[in-house]
């Protein structure tokens, strides 16, 4: 019974991570593909070994390992995807792609916080934030990005002009060759 609770909790976590995805994604099944999995009932966790692929509608998580757990005596559930890097992609309601990558992608269900650690990158409609650590509070819609503070390691933010974002339509590529005037 407890193993079923852990499995159910892991699926709920994955579905919760999609809080800012397309509405239709939330109605889709969650599918986890892995090479193997273990359930550590004593420690209330499920670990999927990879490569691991999680899909729900347009949401896709790729990782080397995925761990779903809750701390002893707490109802707070956490999902941690690790990889070199682990990636998270989705299509937003407006049809534009969003993606994240880091060595570790963690989602805390109670605080509704997404944390990217290690070579973290968050990309939406061509604009990007990169740093060593990125935290996104889904409820308050607040983003905090940090660097290690050493050497040239800095938080980098790239914001595309509105005309760039208007030019990107769902399903189109920005890598099309530009036709020169007068050419056929």
Image: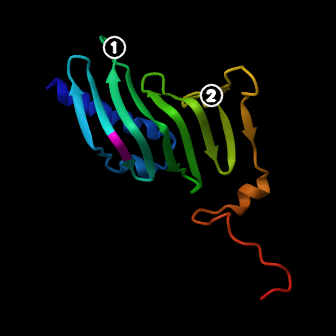
Query: How many angstroms separate mark 2 from mark 1 (CA)?
Result: 28 Å
Q: Please tell me whether residue 113 belongs to the stretch shown in magenta.
A: no
- Towards the viewer: 91 or 94: 91
Instruction: Name the residue at 45% across, 48% down.
Output: 59
Precedes in sequence: disc 2 or disc 1:
1
Q: Is residue 116 left or right of residue 30?
A: right
Which residue is tagged 2?
132
Q: Is residue 165 left or right of residue 180?
A: left
Crowd tier of the residue under label 2, counting other residues whose Cα lies within 10 Å: few below 14, some 14–19, many 20 or above? many
Q: Is residue 79 left or right of residue 46?
A: right
3 over 168 or under it: above or below:
above
Q: Secondary structure at mark 1?
A: loop
Q: Please tell me whether residue 51 belongs to the stretch shown in magenta.
A: yes
Instruction: Name the residue at 34% across, 41% down.
Output: 50
Which residue is tagged 1?
74
Q: Position of residue 108 (x, y in %)?
A: 44, 25
Q: Position of residue 176 (x, y in %)?
A: 68, 70
Instruction: Name the residue at 75% across, 44% down.
Output: 159
Q: Main secondary structure of the magenta part?
A: strand
Q: Position of residue 19 (x, y in %)?
A: 47, 39
CB contact under 8 Å: marks 2 and 1: no
- Towards the viewer: 138 or 118: 118
Highlighted range, magenta: 50-54
Q: Position of residue 120 (x, y in %)?
A: 59, 34
Q: Quadrant of the C terminus?
A: bottom right
């Amino acid at each position: 019974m407890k193993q079923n609770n852990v499995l159910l909790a892991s699926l709920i976590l994955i579905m919760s991570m999609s809080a800012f995805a397309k509405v239709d994604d939330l109605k889709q099944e969650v599918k986890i593909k892995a090479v193997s999995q273990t359930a550590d009932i004593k420690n209330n966790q499920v670990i999927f070994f990879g490569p691991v692929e999680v899909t729900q509608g347009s949401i896709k998580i790729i990782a080397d390992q995925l761990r779903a757990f809750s701390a002893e005596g707490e109802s707070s559930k956490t999902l941690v995807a690790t990889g070199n890097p682990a990636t998270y992609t989705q299509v937003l309601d407006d049809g534009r792609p969003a993606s994240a990558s880091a060595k570790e992608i963690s989602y805390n269900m109670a605080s509704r916080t997404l944390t990217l650690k290690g070579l973290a990158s968050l990309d939406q409609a061509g604009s990007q934030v990169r740093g060593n650590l990125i935290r996104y509070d889904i409820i308050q819609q607040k983003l905090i990005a940090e660097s290690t503070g050493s050497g040239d390691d800095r938080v980098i933010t790239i914001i595309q002009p509105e005309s760039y974002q208007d030019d990107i339509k769902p399903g189109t590529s920005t890598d099309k060759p530009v036709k020169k005037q007068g050419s056929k």
